[in-house]
Amino acid sequence: MAQKGEYFYQGLAGKTAKNYAIPGIRWKDAVRNILMWIFCFLMGRAVIFNEIAPFGAALLASILPRKKGWGIFLLAAGLGFLSMGLNSFVIKHLLILGAVFIYSRVFITRQKRKRNLHTALGVLVSFVLVNLMYIYLQNFLVYDMIVAGLESIIGFLMVFVFGPVADLYIKPKKRSVLSDQEIISICIFLALLIAGIWEVSFFQLSLKKILSVGLVLLFSYIGGAGIGAALGTATGLILSITGKPEPAIIGHFAVCGLMAGTFRGLGRFGTSCAFLLSNALMVFYINRSTETLLKFGEITAAVGILMLIPHRTVERLKQFSDINLQTMRNRKGHMNRLKEIMVDRLEDFSQVFFKLAQVFSKVSQYNVMTGKEGINKLLDLVVERVCAKCGLYKACWQRNFYSTYNNMFEIIGIIESRGAAEQKYISDETAENCLHLDAVLDVLHEAYDVYRINYKWQQKIDECRDLVARQLEGISTVIIRLARELDMDIRFNKDLEDTILIELDKQGIHVKEVTVIEKADGKIKVSITKKTCGRRRECVRIIEKELSNILKKPMTCDYNGCNTGSRRECTLQFTESQRYKIVTGISRKTKQYSDVCGDNYSSTSIDGGKYMLALSDGMGSGSRADAESSIVVSLLENFLEAGFDLDMTINTINSVLVLRSREEIFATADLCVIDLINARADIIKIGAVSTFIKRKDHVDVIKAQALPMGILEEIHAEAMNVILEDGDMIIMVTDGIIDSVDSGLDQDEWLTGTILKCNTRNPQELADFIMEEALGQTNGIANDDMTVMVSRIWKPGI
């Protein structure tokens, strides 16, 4: 079988087939090896103070335990030294490379446990031994001992710098976030690579400085002011100690990196401008513009490099270094994981109830056979008490079994249909064949009475089991819907939280905690915990205004009075301000000769800046209809206030009605949920009559064909979306209003005309007018419960 990365050639030599494996080319590995070869080469050329070069050996030592193919990397580091000429300095470091290589192959394994420490000790030993030999062969000077010791210590420390870089480069897919130590290690590594480049100039522009500025610009834009300043300092220091000593360039790069990172929020262009202006300021401050450390052309070229880097690459690098992003991702990950656990637990509970329902259902099905088994027991009792003592027992129950069995069933049928079996109702054949017919009838009468009572109770038990099974299954359905509702998209906005914290602090309001939640529909909710203000109502006077300015949306505090408890803290909730207001008028009439109205209604605010209008008509009239419609309305209020969606709410309430009784219980549901921020209305009608919307010059009629709740086990109700305008009125009625209209008239047209006749902006007046007109159709007699609910929406100040 061909292995991945290899091509196979099959040739024939006589009758024998042979496979020849040709190594395949893995381009990603090849490119990575070439780059690592270049890194080793350039690191071998990196020299500080013109006589200390521990970097090539330290990098080689870091690579050898982690990657195969050591030969090319050893060769690369050696060629890096040889590119500077062939002298005693180069020969010394070639020997150090050899010593590091031998130590790595003999003493270092690929185990991760204390690998960096073992490698660093090997580098230290190699540098010490070769340097001692080198000093011994040269004239002994104290200065040489100091340089040798310094080089050995730097080589030892650089292993801990290059180790994390080697891990990241060799296995990049296993990491998603970097520590501060790893980021600093990368910065030093890249700065040293630039130091290993030849002194090359294009149009009098230094390649080293162009790459150095580009490196600082990139990491300032990615990591912010802290990383920009750190890398600027490292880059300036390395440029100064590896070339012409320029101490001022260290501070120069540090300040430019700091300012560039500070303005990274303005994008690449803003970062570049900040670096350029900082450079001009530093030049003027250091030497009054007599000499420039970084030329304008060098910075411009570096800016061009920054602009050419793909956006995807920059974002990938950002995810490694942006601590805030990672913190937010971790918090979101924890919230998502917690949500998944809760959903899984609810699904487990749902499965338990579903299995219990199956168990009760199977028991109920099994007991269907109880009737036939009871009859057989009844016949056994007759045989035991009467037939077993009869001389014709064998003739009846052995030779003529089927005939006798049918005769007995005939008698039982007579008892069941007539209540008693007298001899005149029994066939002549049965009477002639049975010698003890009177005794048989007495036993059958007695046993059947017991059987009938037991059978009725067994039926009741079966009905209860079946009901329990259905209720358990209904509970399972409700729980699974709750689980799905929990699986919603909620995001925490860390940037807005930080901005709010800072802006309120500027106003002298010291906040303990801020939480900004963005829901799936784009709405924002802000929670702020702070010390009490001593009833000065800072929440309304100051915080509302600041939040509105920051979020660019009008925000309102859910003010419920001040907290004067022992903790002396207030937790404030801010939501988007409602742009619309609503007022409702109700008119009801109870059916004639009935004490209780079977219609129920609700008009109340719910979660998310919405307003609910609900109207329900129970089956029939009186207290029973009132109870059923009351259940629908109260559950609508509770579910929608808790934040459940409309479809889940309707189906759950329907399940409750189906399971509440074995008798048929119906109730209509007329629901209108209005978003008071954008005036969008969602209308759902379950068995309800038409809804009417009175506009400025016409009336819209909204109708839907659907059975009432409590009939089908599952219903599919689609919400109809309507955009309301300032001054619109929503009219909802029960069938008592519509049915009062003369049968010769179109009911919807009649009510539309009635609405247009009443020229008022007061919803209560319109509700009363409709009720009067409807009663006028029936001579003032209410033939059914009648309810009219009218709501008017308007913009304040208009």
Image: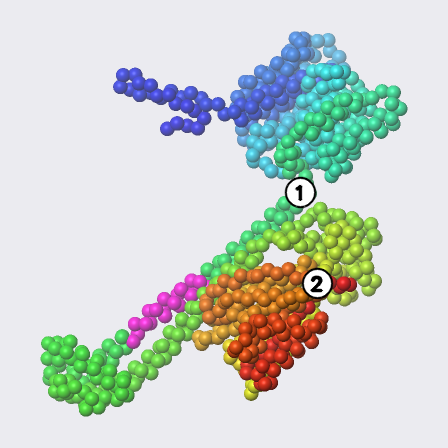
At label 2, which amino acid type do we have? Asp
Taking the view exactly as shown, the residue that stands out farthest to the front is 744
In this rendering, does residue 765 appear at all? yes
Q: Is residue 61 above or below residue 579?
A: above
Q: Name the dominant secondary structure of the magenta segment.
A: helix
| Residue range corresponding to the magenta coloring | 353-371
Give the quarter of the image for residue 39.
top right
For the residue marked with disc 1, what is the amino acid? Leu
Q: CA distance from mark 1 to mark 2?
A: 43 Å
**Mark 1 near mark 2, Cβ–Cβ under 8 Å?**
no
Q: Is 751 rendered above or below residue 278?
A: below
Q: Is residue 754 above or below residue 546?
A: below
**Could you tell me residue 561's position as x and y percent?**
76, 66
Residue at 80% across, 31% down: 255
Nearer the camera: disc 1 or disc 2: 2
Instruction: Assess whether residue 358 is covered by the magenta stretch.
Output: yes
Q: Where is mark 1, residue-wise?
A: 325
Q: Residues within 10 Å of mark 1 (few under 14, many from 20)?
A: some
Under circle 1, the secondary element is helix
Which residue is at 49% across, 64% downward?
715
Tell me: 193 left or right of 19: right
* Quadrant location of the C terminus in the rendered image: bottom right
- Of 116 and 600, nearer the camera is 600
Q: Quadrant of residue 362?
A: bottom left
* Label located before the other in sequence (1 or 2): 1
**Circle 2 residue:** 726
Q: Is residue 634 visible?
A: no
